[in-house]
Image: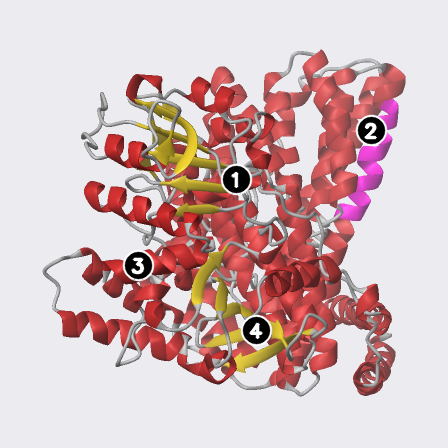
Amino acid sequence: MRKLNYAGRSIALLGLAGWMVIAPLVELLGVAQTVVQNGQNIDAAIAEGDRLFREGSAESLRKAIVAFERALQLSRTAKALDKQALSAVFLGRIYSNLGEQQKALKYYNQSLPLYRAVEDRDGEATTLNNIGIVYDALGEQQKALEYYNQSLPQWRVVGDRRGEAMTLNNIGKVYFDLREQQKALEYYNQSLLLSHAVGDRSGEARTLTNIGGVYSALGEQQKALEYLNQALPQWRAVGDRGGEATTLNHMGSVYYTLGEQQKALEYLNQALPLYRVVGDRGGEARTLNNIGFVYSSALGEQQKGLDYYNQALPLYRVVGDRGGEAGTLNNVAFLLADQKQPELAIALYKQSVNVYESIRQDNQKLPKELRESYAKSISYTYQGLADLLIKQGRLPEAQAVLELLKLKELNTYTRNARTPNTGIRFTDAEQKALTEFLLQYGTAANFDQQISQCEETNCTTLKQLRSQRDQVNIAIRKMLDRLRITLKDQVIDISKLNTEEFNQAARNIVNAQPGTVLIYPIVTETKIQFLLAFKAGAGDEAAVTLRAIDGANIKSEDLFNTTQQLRQALADPTSDLKTLQAKSQQLYTWLIQPLEAELQTAKHLVFVSDRATRHIPLAALYDGKDYLINKPYTLTTILAAKTTDAKTPQPKTPNVLAVGATQFKTAPALEYVASEISAIVQTPQTQQGIFPGLPYLNAQFTFDNLKDSLNGHNILHIATHGKLDPFNIDNSYLLTSSGEKIDKDKISLLQDYGLGSVHLVVLSACDTGTGGKTTEGLEVAGMSHYFMQSGAKSVIASLWQVNDPATALFMQQFYQHLKAGKTKAQAIQQVQTDFI
């Protein structure tokens, strides 16, 4: 699937430009009357560099570098710290404009301590802001925010509202890139008010452009055009061709969205030469990419689209824009797959996934909601790769990709999940093909750039350059034909790929109990697919095999809505039974019916749920005659195969630590908890319980008592109020009688107190496993994941709020079935059947 770089998608149609600061020379120099000859030379070099910088062309920027390098050397000789700082910050700005971010960072890191040494807060704020720009361009949004948030108070201390507006704009851009549109809008609106108040037309134009980008991402295209049409004349009035190009690029994306493709191309083709004139290779890459998107996705000219994508790709790599690179790799992979070149498409999808993984790894400390919105926006690349691998019969690799996606989703949602820091490995042939592919297209892009510059200057070598470019194009087409054959004939050695640990986790689950089928539903925007793992044959020696099954063509939104309607009907005792069964049967048709032929001999179904399927109460699915709970197999849902312990057997001598409360300072009473715990736990004083253990009720139920008594027990039963916030896991907790909140941080401490020896955690609480508010369904993992990542082997929790007496009765019967020798899944199934 091809993706836009807004509203959860990832091609750079709306590449917002950051905002760098260079303070006026008169303010920063303050030495116009210098009489020392060396000082005059420094001033002259800086003035020359400033003049060339403001010309704004790629050629003048290169000349400006020479001038500022001369100024920097002279300043060092004269020990003029302020001028050293100014020269270095100019050099950083120029290199950043040219897309050479590491060089920019080198000079900014020289200027920052110099400004601090001379106590120049304006200069310090400028440099901090500009370092933030560099990290944002490199895809390190976490670091960008750190520097912006250092810059902002400095501007406010010195009363520089123009600088404050600039940094507010840049913070807005970070939130935009992370798909947090409303938060971006808050910062942009603050920036716009300040820019307008101080009469900064460039600042106003930039923020108007960025606000237009937000409204476009929110689907309000006409409102977006209103803001963009305000920005464009302001850029032209101040002569900022780079800013003008950015706004034109935005307008092209808006007209694309409105279905006016020729108008989109008109604006994009105006932006492209402007970016080239000012030497903004990042902007050039975005625009080339966007033109390619229009040709390939809207006009059906795939080869033309591919040509533009392949001009953009090496530019993204040169400027270090990893997000742009990954998005374009995804788009090229999509086109190659559509052109029946799946082998090369797989290699490019893999590279896209690995680039995205590098970005996510660098932003692990961002707030959860930012990481989650970003993860959602890139998940389709993983699913696109898995889909193509399945179609090519490369099922072990597909299963590894799906496992990686599940683990990364959990890592994003819970911040500190135990997930491997790994990407997807290439076959030897894929690695060679990818290297040659990128090299050839880099060569082609160099010719394209030379031709563009030659056309602007009417150089005499234009015909020769075009002829050379034609030869490169011929070589590229021959390369693609050759790579297609090479990759098609490759012998894939799975042992050289990093699929084994993922595949072994699946085998462990399938081998744990005879008749187990591991099921991965794959929910894309327009259909459902399934990847199954099961034993192909009878006996212990039978191999575990993988099989792909096509499912229904159904929009993910329709799946989510139907799931929510079923959940609401199940939660309402007044619901009409026929309506409930109709919704349940529809979900059965989508999720179970395509698998029926493979499940005829199954005894245990283990689902690794995806997106909306995480919300579905599988036991309640209806085939028109009976519910799934009454079928001859148990039902289990897991977070991921890799996080599931399938080897540890059930304890032969269960010992329960049961904690709970009937009365609360801040929540309604749960009067049946006392009888629930007494019916479960058998103590030396009473022999009426089901399993031996230790109970803590009401005032005795404290976190300290729980952790100090955990060691030596293999079942932890918690009967209390719980709260799961689907939008912020940090706000989720279990509640003691006194009002003490047992949150994720306290749960993580339990790994030091024996949670690793606990076979089963039972959350017999109101609300602990509930979810249903977000389409991804990650919140359904709820507290369960925190107990498991802290060492617990398994967790049982409800999918929704449960009536207190019903919970107590359910739990008692569950433990009775465990005592009778049933597995956890069998015990749950039996209780659910009893409750029907």
**Amino acid type shown at disc 3:** Gln
- Going from N to C along the chain, the mark reached first, 1 or 3, is 1
Q: Are the two marked residues, 2 and 4, in contact with CB atoms closer than 8 angstroms?
A: no
**Nearer mark to the viewer, of 3 and 2:** 3
Mark 3 residue crowding within 10 angstroms, few (<14) / some (14–19) / many (20+): some
Is residue 761 within the magenta segment?
Answer: no
Task: Tell me, yes or no, if residue 558 can be seen here.
Answer: no
User: Residue 532 got which mark?
Assistant: 4
Mark 4 residue crowding within 10 angstroms, few (<14) / some (14–19) / many (20+): many
The percent position of residue 98, horizontal first and vertical second, equals 73, 49
Q: Is the magenta stretch mostly helix, strand or loop?
A: helix
Name the residue tied to disc 3.
Answer: 832
Q: How far apart are marks 2 and 1 (CA)?
A: 80 Å
Q: How far apart are marks 3 and 2 (CA)?
A: 79 Å
* Residue at left offset 56%, top offset 40%: 789
Name the residue tied to disc 1.
Answer: 653
**Amino acid type shown at disc 2:** Ala
Q: Are the two marked residues, 3 and 2, in contact with CB atoms closer than 8 angstroms?
A: no
Q: Distance between the residues labelled 1 and 3?
A: 25 Å
* Residue at left offset 49%, top offset 44%: 785
Element assignment for label 3: helix
**Amino acid type shown at disc 4:** Leu
Q: Are the two marked residues, 2 and 1, in contact with CB atoms closer than 8 angstroms?
A: no
Name the residue tied to disc 2.
Answer: 71
**Nearer mark to the viewer, of 3 and 4:** 3
Range of residues picked out in magenta: 61-74
- Going from N to C along the chain, the mark reached first, 3 or 4, is 4
Q: In this view, does 668 lie above or below 589?
A: above
